[in-house]
Image (cartoon, grey):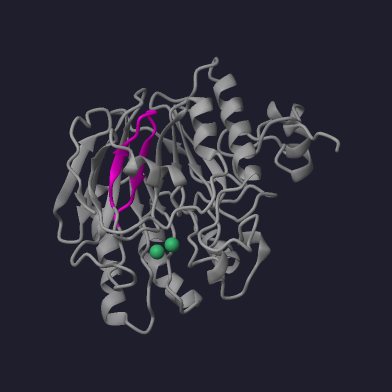
Amino acid sequence: MKKISRRDFLAASGMMAGAAMLPGGVASAADKKKDDRVVLSGKAGPTLRFRADGKFKILQLTDTHYISSKPELSDPMIDDIRRYIEIEKPDLIIHTGDIIYTDYDIPSFEKILKPIAEAGIPFFITWGNHDHDFSPEMQKRVEKEPMNEGFPVPGLPGLSNFALPILPSAGGNKPAAMVYSFDSLDVAANSYKFDPQFSAERPEIPGSAWITREQIHWYEAVSEQTTRENGGVPVPSYSFFHIALPEFSEAYDYRWTRIIGEHYESSGRAQLNSGLYVSMLDHKDMVGVFCGHDHDINMIMDYKHGIKLVYGQVTGRSGAYCHLPESYGCRVIELTEGEREFDTWIRLYNGDTEYRVNSGKMVTDTHSGR
Ligand SMILES: [Fe+2]
Ligand SMILES: [Fe+2]
């Protein structure tokens, strides 16, 4: 069989830029002379930049699961989201998926989109397994919002695959940090209207899908390009997607992992290991990986290899798959320019914060659960 190089693969899949891109997907006159830049994003969104004080705050919402038949449970989330944004004043809002529950309708999606889109703050959505029966329609809808940052790279499985540079506080276009979104696809046995674009590579295998090798090859190409353009120094990078990698479970089972937070269910993590974590280790840029999907887990884990593995805090109060009473809110991640550690905490619906920690100072295991 003829061996296909990564370069051939990227060219064939459309990931090599026909219209070359600056970080953030902005075409420039200089770059138009080149034809081999990797596409970071399907289209430029608002520019992300560290604040003058060198900070950049991300607010992670996850698993809102709006249920239209239970508005008395679901509607309070809309005010919750507005309140989290008002209190934290983030620079970027990320929803890591499962916007809706099982009543697949755009109006339910709109209920959750509204407080996010109206905040006037850059945001993106990385789709969850509950979203994928309607995610093409919802993606088109979200792209009409002026503060949306999520424009899929063409040619990759799923939709929410893109990389966003965070530019330096002092100005200039050389990324000081990178934020990646991957589409972690669907749950093979749980599809309402099966679409191979969102299924696993092997949909006959039940359980959660996995991020595919095509997506990993794209990440590698972006990472290598970004490192090369940073004088060979990997740029601190952060990944967001819905379904945990197998390493999340392995980290939890590994006796030396330092853990802060709660673990009250077995992870519905990817069924097979397609190698993204190893690729991230090899590329030496990834600082933290952030996911949702497991509603009764909100841990941050300092695994032995240095990449922090972090769950969001379930935002949904609809009761869908949540077993911890009064445990809903969001996760806040504060980056510091030039550093490879970050501060993070959970903001609860009642205004309290918990599990506040600097990722470089996790010296004790303070988790609860089973
Ligand atoms: Fe969920
Ligand atoms: Fe999910």
Residue 22 in view of the camera: no
Residue 252 in view of the camera: yes
Tell me, yes or no, whether the highlighted magenta stretch contains residue 54. no
- Residue 294 x %, y %: 36, 58
Q: Quadrant of residue 258?
A: top left
The answer to whether residue 267 is left or right of residue 273 is left
Residue at the far top in the pictured view: 231
The answer to whether residue 340 is left or right of residue 365 is right
- Residue 142 x %, y %: 52, 61
Residue at the far right in the pictured view: 2
Seen in the picture, residue 149 relative to 237 is either above or below; the reply is below
Residue at the far bottom in the pictured view: 69
- Quadrant in which the C terminus is drawn: bottom left
Count of residue discs: 0
Tell me, yes or no, whether the highlighted magenta stretch contains residue 304. yes
Magenta range is 298-313
Ligand 2, seen in the image, is in the quarter at bottom left
Seen in the picture, residue 147 relative to 365 is either above or below; the reply is below
For the point 22% across and 28% down, the residue is: 361
- Residue 217 x %, y %: 64, 37
For the point 20% across and 61% down, the residue is: 349
Seen in the picture, residue 123 relative to 116 is either above or below; the reply is above
Q: Quadrant of residue 1?
A: top right
Q: Quadrant of residue 222?
A: top right
